[in-house]
Image (cartoon, rainbow, N blue to C red):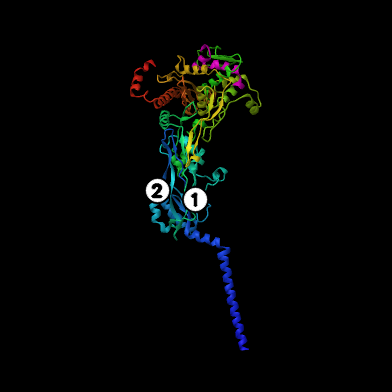
Amino acid sequence: MLKETENSRLNWLVAIFLAFIFVIAIRLYNLQVIHNQFYSDKAHSNRTRFIRDRAQRGRMVDRNGIQLAATKPSFSLFITPEDFPGDRRDGVYLRLSRILGIPPSMIREKYFESKTARFRPRKIVGNLTQEQVVRIETNRYHLPGVTINAENVRAYPYKTSLCHVLGYVGEISQRQLESNEYAGYRIGDIVGQTGIERTFESALNGQDGYRWVEVDATGRQGFTLQYPAPVQAVPGSELRLTVDLELQRSCEKFLTPWKGCIIVMDPRNGDVLALVSRPGYDPNWFVSGISLPLWKSIIDNPDNPLLNRALQMEAPPGSIFKIITAVAALCSPGFNKDTTLFCNGVFNFSNHLFHCWNKRGHGNVNLEGALEGSCNVFFYQAGIHAGIDLIAETARSFGLGQITGIALPGEQAGFIPDRQWKKKTFNDDWWPGETISVSIGQGGVTTTPIQLAVMMAMIANRGILYEPRLVTGFMGHTARESRKLDPVVRSRVTRFTDWDMIITGLNRVVAGPNGTARRLKMREMTVAGKTGTAQVISAQALKRLGYASEAEVDPRFWDHNWFAGFGPVESPEVVVVVLLENGGKTGAQKKFEVAKKVFLRWYELNRPGYFGPEKEHQRSESSDNV
């Protein structure tokens, strides 16, 4: 009986032992087989960290290879959630706030803004100073999870020069992250926000690399693991621009201190040699996040330095539009180059008087003479003869009333009114009297400076409408990633063929005895062009605002001043457009000086040996004969 009891106890002990062994075996199987990958990854994440190596952004160079936008080394602060204990976060925020000079709440917001995995570092702030780096490293023990990584940041060596062409980069916004255009980007990434930086973002950005590194208990990085194999970052492509930096900086100097813009273009292929819009800004302000006071000063500036006036400012072209009216009239039956009309200083149409700028009148004048003297009365009659439909059609065939396709965001289309627009908008018919205002570039007509540059280039090359080109190509990491961007012909004018007559008339504007741009005449090259004055507000409206005399008018209401032309007339190589915003009476004279300086600077840069100290001396001695 006693022996049976002992055997029973032994059996129970064996059963319990076997059950224990079975439970352990099941647990080991569960850990090492079923959940092997989970715990392996967890162990891996405890001793390793994923590091993303940002690709170096592609640089931009001018047509001569001068560097316009590059990258420079910088340090950024990251926090890895896996190494960032919750009970110490407030203390870390406070300590970092004292070092970085920003509120703890801002650091907290940046940390929780990012939704990366726990083992992936989250970028908090970039472009650290050397002093900040030293202080962070000195306080490493008190900053668990905080690391500093080297990065490349954008640098614009010429600051405000070309700011509206190059644009600027900045941290990607939430709206951008949610769009398909930025698929694959993460919070903290730096992307192009305006200008070429934005248009060519995919080419400039490159491809990021990554690697895994071992870390200690405090998160300090050790050596790089070879498995998984590290992936090298691929730099972004280098963009070669059409602009000439020397010409660009000279144009910026010539435009100072005026608001407005200057465009220089090659009519043979549409290359933009210079594009100046003033006032401007320094794109370096935005690279690491612009301060709130500086940003407020920019957006509150009434002169709007962020506005690219070359393609975003829509204004009446004034008398420059008379070229369109002339072409439309020549394309209509019963009007030719020999048509002569009389101007006595006023035109009576349906008992309404429309005045010429020359109160004494121009007398009998043909088309070339009307262009030379900018006779309003001639173009009133030419416009009525052609009609609004043909004028609008001609304007659009010359690139007006539509975007030019220049590789910059935010371009405006301007506006060309016609009878269909009026019927649709106001449910009213178009009246012939309205054509009179349109025929001289008023009456609702608006254009941008880049449109007028394209139009002048089209006249200079006799009918080819080029898309303005800013980038000739980009050179990638491999030959397959490199690409050449050829000139783009948008359309050709075949209906009109009398280009010589228009060009002769525009040359007489500069070289003729009655030309309105005689001050532009120079020995170095022959120039053809047209001036224009864009009325900002009517005289009647000024009176309603309480301005008794012209001298009292607020400068905001002063006229805009235009010049658009090209040269040399015999074989055009350069188009110049100048807009002085709210230039008023002073700008009406100053525009000639600005345009002449641009032509001469282009001549100096493109005719080496023909324009030097001796030539300057000879020109000044014989200036009385020019």
Which of the two discs, 1 and 2, labels the residue nearer the N terminus? 1
Question: Can residue 345 be spotted in the picture?
Answer: yes
At a point 50% along the width and 61% down the height, the residue shown is 43
Residue 374 on the magenta segment: yes
Residue 129: image tag: 2
Q: Nearer the viewer, residue 461 or 189?
A: 461
State the residue lying farthest toward the right: 427
Residue 434: image tag: none
At a point 47% along the width and 47% down the height, the residue shown is 233
Where disc 1 sits, the SS reads helix
* Residues packed near mark 1 inside 10 Å, few (<14), some (14 to 19) or many (20 plus): some
Residue extent of the magenta highlight: 362-390
Dividing the image into 4 quarters, which one contains the N terminus? bottom right
Q: Position of residue 355 (x, y in %)?
A: 54, 16
Please say if 539 is above or below 311: above
Question: Can residue 443 be spotted in the picture?
Answer: no
Q: Nearer the viewer, residue 94 or 21?
A: 21
Q: Nearer the viewer, residue 477 or 261?
A: 477
Q: Amino acid at mark 2?
A: Thr
CB of mark 1 within 8 Å of CB of mark 2?
A: no
Q: Position of residue 74 (x, y in %)?
A: 42, 47
Residue 110: image tag: 1
Report whether 510 appears left or right of 438: left
Report, in whole angstroms, how far the alpha carbon at label 1 lies from the one at label 2. Answer: 19 Å
At a point 51% along the width and 45% down the height, the residue shown is 172
Main secondary structure type of the part rendered in magenta: helix
Where disc 2 sits, the SS reads loop
